Amino acid sequence: MKQEGKVRFLLRLVCGLVATACLAAFGTVAAAVPATAAAATGAITGSVDDADTGTAVPGVCVYAYPQSDDGPDPDVNPYEATTTGDGAHGIGNLPAGTYSVYFDPTCGRTQMSAYAPQYYDGAVAASGARTVDVQANVSGIDAQLVEGATVSGAVAAPGAANYAGICTYAIDPGGTVSEGVVTSASGSYALTDLAPQTYTIKFAKEHPLSEELAVSVRGGREVTTTVRVS
């Protein structure tokens, strides 16, 4: 998958409507199209639990993204389901094919969650996802969620007011955008629900800014940073 396609795909997941405004720094955005109709042949089922306690986690959105030859197709909407009270999920009516499965506790930022999102099988980035081949019903596609970390701070310019409207991204070691937000009127930002690992924090307005930060986070922890741009 081309890098621009990866950015489009991941920012749709992590930023929602914010992503469209921020993507001017990375190129134009093609409109997503529904998954093409085909004969339904199978389903993906499993459960979602807390990695520490083993208790079921209800209300988690589970997305099955059809795979292209180069990875998840950024221009096709996923099939989806939501975990029930006992943590179970089931995505039915799937055409035969290969899918990447993404577990999003915030359901596209429509609800709050203490958990970090992940791909099957425990991957924090799309590049590490284990794909699922669907030719019939596939069970055991489970997730054990860990508590997410937060990187927060502010963007400021020397001798000037803080910068509002700066697109701020957490990028994992593989170059994948894991989270993205826009700074507030005071220049503050908070990148939440991050899986434990090291990130490069990058900033963009109309174009990417040269300033960046390297931050390592652990589950449930918050790291506070301030960056000054010229």
Image (cartoon, grey):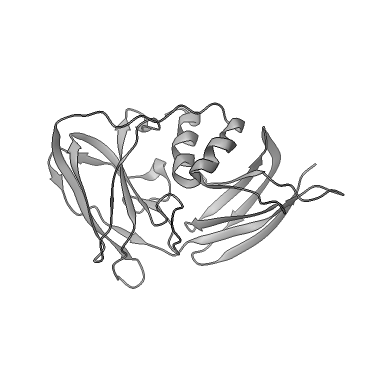
Instruction: Identify the residue at image location x=62%, y=62%.
Output: 223
For residue 127, which quarter of the picture?
Answer: top left
Q: Specify whether 170 is left or right of 138.
A: right
Q: In what quadrant of the picture does the C terminus appear?
A: top right
Give residue 117's position: percent from left, percent from top. 41, 54
Asked if residue 158 shows in the view, the reply is yes
Q: Is residue 129 left or right of residue 30?
A: left
- Residue 29, horizontal then vertical, whole percent: 50, 28
Q: Which residue, as the protein is rendered here, is positioned at the far bottom?
A: 53
User: Which residue is at the front of the view, 65 or 131?
Assistant: 65
Q: Is residue 9 depicted above or below 158 in this figure?
A: above
Residue 148: image x %, image y %? 47, 61
Q: Residue at x 46, y 30 (%)?
A: 5
Q: Residue at x 67, y 33 (%)?
A: 206
Residue 189 picture quarter: bottom right
Residue 222, image quadrant: bottom right
How many numbered marks does the figure carry?
Answer: 0
The quarter of the image holding the N terminus is top left
- Residue 63, compared with residue 111, is above or below; it is above
Is residue 174 something one can see in this rendering? no
Which residue lies at the image location 50% right of the left edge and 45% below the top edge? Answer: 15
Q: Is residue 122 left or right of residue 84?
A: right
Return the x and y of residue 19 as percentages of the image width and height. Answer: 53, 40
